[in-house]
Image (tube, rainbow, N blue to C red):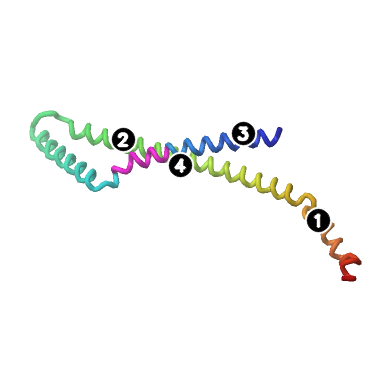
Amino acid sequence: GGDSAKKAGLKALHQQLAAQLRQWEGLRDKSAGLADDAAARRELAELEALEQQGAREASGGEHPGKLRKAFRDASNKVEMQVEAMCGLVESIESLVKRADRVGGELQQELHRSMFQHFAHVNSPQRLVKALAQGPPPAAVAQ
């Protein structure tokens, strides 16, 4: 009963961690273009073109407000990506804490099952008493 529930919990945790990993890789792939020099140069060229267009607009050119709209759109896009990454990091932190707690519980359970046949492992009084009595007579005779 308890083991199957723990296994089911661990499988669910594994699925959540795998989903978080896929989300993280997706965000990493989306942000890979940010580190790309060629993409940065293209973005800079586009911004310079928009700046020149903005200068023309300021002097009464075509398409008023296009620069402001492009800046707002880019700012909103970056802000949404930052919020998504922050949310992802928070959920990963909570999953890691949960996995750590479950791992600790499994370690304690494994320790108990491995050492249950040693009476003194979980009882310091028994260990002290056994040590105070000295070695068994058969061990002294050898």
Q: Residue at x 23, y 36 (%)?
A: 71
Q: Residue furthest bottom?
A: 141
Q: Which mark is residue 89?
A: 4
Determine which residue is flagged by label 1.
120
Q: Which mark is residue 106?
A: none
Placement of the C terminus among the 4 image quadrants: bottom right
Determine which residue is flagged by label 3.
8
As for residue 49 lying within the magenta part, the answer is no
In the rendered picture of this protein, how many numbered marks are placed on residues?
Answer: 4
Marks 1 and 4 sit apart, C-alpha to C-alpha, by 44 Å
Q: Which mark is in front, 1 or 4?
A: 1
Q: Are marks 3 and 4 in contact (CB under 8 Å)?
A: no
For badge 2, the amino acid type reads: Lys
Marks 2 and 3 sit apart, C-alpha to C-alpha, by 38 Å
- Percent x, y of residue 67: 18, 34
As for residue 31 lying within the magenta part, the answer is yes
Q: Secondary structure at mark 2?
A: helix
Q: Residue at x 58, y 46 (%)?
A: 100
Q: Which mark is in front, 2 or 3?
A: 3
Q: Residue at x 70, y 35 (%)?
A: 2
Marks 3 and 4 sit apart, C-alpha to C-alpha, by 25 Å
User: Which quadrant of the figure has residue 72?
Assistant: top left
For badge 1, the amino acid type reads: His
Q: Residue at x 33, y 39 (%)?
A: 30
As drawn, 81 above or below 115: above
Q: Which mark is in front, 1 or 2?
A: 1
Crowd around label 4: few <14 · some 14–19 · many ≥20 (10 Å) = some
For badge 4, the amino acid type reads: Val
Determine which residue is flagged by label 2.
77
Q: Which residues are magenta?
A: 23-33
